[in-house]
Amino acid sequence: MNKYLVAVATVIALGGAAHAASAVNLDAEPRVLIVTEGGARSELTLAAGETVDFCSGGCFVTLPNGDREALTGTETLEIQGGAGRIK
């Protein structure tokens, strides 16, 4: 029974991670995203070359160049030249 519960918990945890947006910083310097998710606003700093998962339940993100985008949690955001491109 315990093995079954552990297996179910693992599947749920992995399933949640699979539905998060990701951001990759292709620039040579750190970039900051402003993320608003569930009414909470936070700053997400990405080092040069770093990739992070965020925004699992949909959010708004303000890009380094000031553009604002709505994400559902399935996109990949590439930052290059201070601008973002959603894939």
Image (cartoon, grey):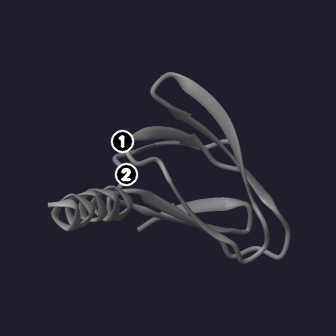
Mark 1–mark 2 Cα distance, whole angstroms, equals 6 Å
Q: Position of residue 24 (x, y in %)?
A: 60, 70
Where residue 10 sits, quadrant-wise, is bottom left
Quadrant the N terminus occupies: bottom left
Q: Which of pointers 1 and 2 lies earlier in the amino acid sequence?
A: 1
Amino acid type at circle 1 is Gly
Residue sitting at x 40%, y 56%: 20
Taking 11 as reference, is 56 left or right?
A: right
Closer to the camera, 55 or 79?
55
In the picture, the disc for residue 57 is 1
Q: Residues within 10 Å of mark 1 (few under 14, many from 20)?
A: some
Residue sitting at x 37%, y 51%: 73
Q: Position of residue 65 (x, y in %)?
A: 71, 49
Amino acid type at circle 2 is Gly
Q: Are marks 1 and 2 in contact (CB under 8 Å)?
A: yes
Where residue 46 sits, quadrant-wise, is bottom right
Closer to the camera, 6 or 27?
6
Residue sitting at x 33%, y 55%: 16
Q: Residues within 10 Å of mark 2 (few under 14, many from 20)?
A: some
Q: In the displayed image of the protein, which residue is found farthest to the right? A: 29
Q: Position of residue 2 (x, y in %)?
A: 22, 61
In the picture, the disc for residue 73 is 2
- Element marked by disc 1: loop
